[in-house]
Image: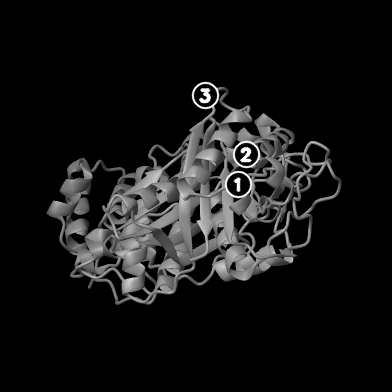
Amino acid sequence: MRNRVVITGLGGICGLGTDAAAIWSAMRAGRSAIGEMTNSNLHQIKVKTGCEIKALPDHGIPHKQIVSMDRFSLLAVIAAREAMRQSGLVAGDAETYRMGAVIGVGICGWEAIEENYRAILLEGRNRAGIFTVPKVMPGAPAGQVSMDLGLRGPVFGVTSACSSANHAIASAVDQIRLGRADVMVAGGTDAPLAWGILKGWEALRVLAPDTCRPFSADRQGLVLGEGAGMAVLESYEHATARGAVILGEIAGVGFSGDASDIVAPTIEGPEAAMRACLADAGFNPGDVDYLNAHGTGTKANDQIETAAIKRVFADHAKKLSVSSTKSMHAHCLGASGALEMIACVMAIREGIVPPTANYREPDPDCDLDVTPNVARERPVRTALSNAFAFGGTNAVLAFKAV
Amino acid sequence: MADELTTDIITKIKAHAEPGGEEITSATELTALGIHSLELTEIIFDLEEDYGIEIEMNTVDAWANLKNVGDIVEAVRALIAKKA
């Protein structure tokens, strides 16, 4: 019998709010935080639409620590502290080697790159900032979170573009299942609203000029956002032994690779990942009440994801509540799956399916119940969370009530 | 009484220290500044540009040889003298 893995803390920060409760409250209300980007100098970028954290909360992280962090690490630490606070855990001396962190990152710490190439190439400076390497590296958020919370067990970063957070959470689940740790902080982070990154996305011509409208016939693409989401995962035995409040269970994980094209998705890859996840969780298709879709709002994704869901769920596909919360928090790349985990866990806890905001026109190719614009009350026993990515790296998580 | 070079270097260090901390003097231990070790190394390297000197130290050496603010001042003073 393998170790069951439960969630005892949640933390989050994104355009919707600076803690998990605020994020969930906005999701329930169907409020989209997508709008004009004003925080930083984006120079010449055509698309001005994004999903920014307008102001950071008063986090109390010491200056000495802040100078060594790029924005994606700072967001990760803020969310991880929140999740840890909710769990009631403190890394004590005896347990510290049984507690770890796995954090998904889609890109890297870009502020330092941006500052350096501008300083060196445009302003003639001859030396890069001394923190450039430790700020930029994709493993930095995991390291910073471990330092901040005193976690000395398995600590590493995970990267798979837009499915990074789901792969990270699944990898943290594995550490607990394999007995390497009792407690893992897991999630994802990214802060991509910088000129260099946006310029790259602009070239791909997949960014929506106005807003993100997943599954709507008039959708024009995705919108990028910044954020971080974290959970404290714990073995069921460890959580019950200390009398912790259990928020939900990670019932299963499922992976697949499209092995097809670096950007164009397939139906078979997502289908295989969802099937693998159901099998790992021991769910029948009919057991699933809510599916948090990858739902980026691009023509291709939403259509192909719909087709894949229909193949996996057959007759049950139309009874399933589906939604894309990216319509509200945008696509936060490495953080997306972690923010969507908040949606799934809270949907189960409150019996409320968060909606797909900004929805206007039915699309015959996306004819599932996508919960348009208004949240729906219904008992949610279980939820699936899809994450697909450039590279065809698919990862699906299954959640259930405990 | 601190000389000009000392005052100048302390001013540069202050800009990186936590506001509202204790007063910084030549005797202040570097570990007591509340400044990340790499950031302090960068302050030292910034002095290269400001004083037109070359500090031939890697990051590890910088830390092994310098204990307090006065040590930085004296290291820079020696390099300026060498250049002159």
Q: Is residue A111 visible?
A: no
- Mark 2 belongs to which amino acid? Val
| Image x and y of residue A101, in percent | 35, 55
Label 1 close to label 2 by CB (< 8 Å): yes
**Residues at marks 1 and 2, CA–CA distance in whole angstroms:** 7 Å
Is A25 above or below relative to A4? below
> Relative to the observer, which residue lies in front, A22 or A316?
A316
Circle 2 marks a residue in which chain? Answer: A
**Residues at marks 3 and 2, CA–CA distance in whole angstroms:** 20 Å
Taking the spot 70% from the left edge, 59% from the top edge, the residue there is A33
- Mark before the other along the chain sequence, 3 or 2: 3
- Mark before the other along the chain sequence, 1 or 3: 3
Label 3 secondary element: loop
| Image x and y of residue A230, in percent | 47, 59
Q: Which residue is mark 1?
A: A285
Same chain check for tags 3 and 2? yes
Q: Quadrant of residue B13?
A: bottom left
- Mark before the other along the chain sequence, 1 or 2: 1
- Mark 1 belongs to which amino acid? Pro
Q: Which residue is mark 2?
A: A312
- Mark 3 belongs to which amino acid? Ala
Please state which of the two labelled residues, at mark 3 or mark 2, is closer to the viewer.
2
Residue A259 is labelled as 3
